[in-house]
Amino acid sequence: MSGLTVDLNDHVWVITRPREVVRPVEGKPAAPPIMEFDAAGNFIQGWGGPGQGYEWPNAEHGVTVDSKGFVWIAGRGKDDNQILKFTRDGKFVMQIGRSAQSKGNTDTTNVNLPADVTYYAKTNEIFVADGYGNRRVIVFDADSGKFKRMWGAFGNVPTDPEPVEDSGRVERRGGLRSQQVDG
């Protein structure tokens, strides 16, 4: 399990990574990526995975159910530059961003390995913790998916790391990790 949330009906929603099951029980499939349980722990439904019209994440990560009953998911795997919105029974509604299309911290169309999504009903916005690949919080309209605003550390403008030259190698530093780039 990589994430969970509780909806307005006190149902627990869990997101899993079925493709990462190390030793599945023979003859039994892994659990579906999205599962809903009632407050007593009874399984209600499960759904999710690749399908028509959307790009399912490579590594499922965050799940949120908004006050309208829509289920939002994020992924933090290679090329996961999108957020997905579904009905509570798994019907695809909208995708924000495209797989493998991130252009960095100033990109207002794509995210980059988003950790999670949170819904704010008062303004009908989703807040994305876009911190595995980028270093920011980015906000979208929950109905249209249009970009609203974003910020980086301490409320500053989000920026991409500056290259630092060291003995013929270029290293980009920033956020929680460094990435070496041959050059």
Image (cartoon, grey):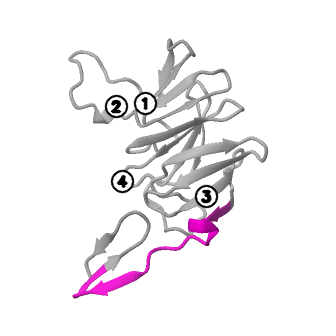
User: Where does label 1 land, which residue?
Assistant: 33
Q: Mark 4 vs mark 3: give the one in front.
A: 3
Mark nearer the N terminus (4 vs 3): 4
Which residue is identified by label 4?
78
Q: Disc 2 marks which amino acid? A: Pro
Which residue is painted at 59% across and 58% down in the image? 137
The residue that mark 3 highlights is 138
Give percent across and percent down for residue 172: 36, 76
Single out the mark in the foreground, 3 or 1.
Answer: 3
Q: Position of residue 62 (x, y in %)?
A: 49, 41
Element on which disc 4 rests: loop
Q: For the residue labelled by badge 3, is the local secondary structure a helix, a strand or a loop?
A: strand
Say which residue label 2 marks: 18
Residue under the image location 52 percent in, 68 percent down: 105
Which of the 4 image quarters holds residue 27?
top left
Q: Residue at x 63, y 21 (%)?
A: 10
In this picture, which residue range is highlighted in magenta? 149-170
- Whether residue 152 is visible: no
